[in-house]
Image (cartoon, rainbow, N blue to C red):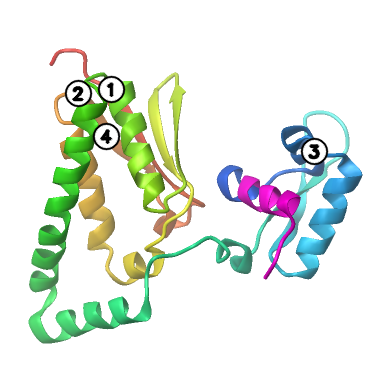
Amino acid sequence: MEYSKNQEQILRRLKTRGPQSVKILSNQLDMTTMGVRQHLADLGRKGVVKQTQEEKQTRGRPVRLWKLTKSGHENFTDSDSQITLELIEAVRSSLGEDSLDVIIEERHKPLLRKYKSEMDDAGQTLELRIKKLAELRNQEGYMAEVRLTPTGWLLIENHCPIRSIAESCQQLCQSELEIFRELFRGRGEVERIDHLLAGARRCAYRIIEIHDF
C-alpha cells in the first residue's frame, strides 16, 4: 500500500507516540488541522488508522484520538518469517523446551559480544552507552529511542520486528532482558516497565545509574 510523505509521518508518529489528537498531530508535524484530518480520513479508508472513544480533558469538550489499527502496525517491517516459527516448533516438539533454551542462549552470545564491543567504543558514561544501544537496536528494526526522566533513563522500543516469534517463544524476551542487564552490570539497574506481549503498545526499559562502581 502506498502513502504520501505526510501520511508516512502521521503513521510513524502514531507508532512511536501512541494515540494522538488532530491538534497535536498538526502542531508536531507542522501541518494544518484540515490537512491532518484529510490524511487521517484517507488512512482510515485504507484501514490503517481508527478513532478511539472520546477522551475527557481537564478543560473543554472531550476529544477523539487517532491510533493505528492492527493493519497499521503491520506496515512496519518485521524480520520474522514462517520458517523460523516452524523451526522453533520442530525443536520444541522433537528435542524439548530445554534444548530450545540452549539454542536461544547460544544465539544471544554473539549478540552480547557485539553490543558490548560497540558500546565500549562509544564511551564509558551511562548516557553514551544507552544511546549506542538504542542506535544498534534501531539498526535491527526496533524503532528505539532514549529519554531521560526524573526516575532514570528510558530505552524505548516502539516496534518489535520479531513479535510473532516472541509470542511463540517468550524465552527470547527474557533473554534480551538478561542481555541488557549484563551490558549495564555495575553501571545501571535495568527494569522492563512496558512489555508488548503483556498488552503494552511498546517495550520500555528503565535504567537507573549506579554511582558506586
Q: Nearer the viewer, mark 4 or mark 1?
A: 1
x and y percentages locating residue 174 in the rendered image: 24, 53
Quarter assignment of residue 104:
bottom left
Per the rendered image, the range of residues in magenta is 1-13
What whole-number distance in Å separates the C-alpha atoms at marks 4 and 3? 35 Å
Q: Callout 1, which amino acid?
A: Leu
What whole-number distance in Å separates the C-alpha atoms at marks 1 and 3? 35 Å
What whole-number distance in Å separates the C-alpha atoms at marks 3 and 2? 40 Å
Does 108 appear above or below 155? Answer: below
What whole-number distance in Å separates the C-alpha atoms at marks 2 and 4? 10 Å
Indicate the secondary structure of the residue bearing disc 2.
loop
Q: Callout 2, which amino acid?
A: Arg
x and y percentages locating residue 161 in the rendered image: 41, 60
Q: Pointer 1 and pointer 2: residues touching (CB < 8 Å)?
A: yes
Residue at image position (67%, 53%) is 8
Does 169 appear above or below 60? Answer: below
Q: Pointer 4 and pointer 3: residues touching (CB < 8 Å)?
A: no
x and y percentages locating residue 113 in the rendered image: 14, 44
Mark 3 surroundings within 10 Å by alpha-carbon count, few (fewer than 14), some (14 through 19), many (20 or more): some
Indicate the secondary structure of the residue bearing disc 4.
strand
In the picture as drawn, the residue positioned furthest to the right comes out as 34
* Label 1 vs 3, first from the N-terminus: 3
* Residue carrying label 4: 190
Q: Pointer 3 and pointer 2: residues touching (CB < 8 Å)?
A: no
Q: Is residue 144 left or right of residue 122?
A: right
* Residue carrying label 3: 26
Indicate the secondary structure of the residue bearing disc 3.
helix
Indicate the secondary structure of the residue bearing disc 1.
helix
* Residue carrying label 1: 126
Q: Which mark is residue 134?
A: none
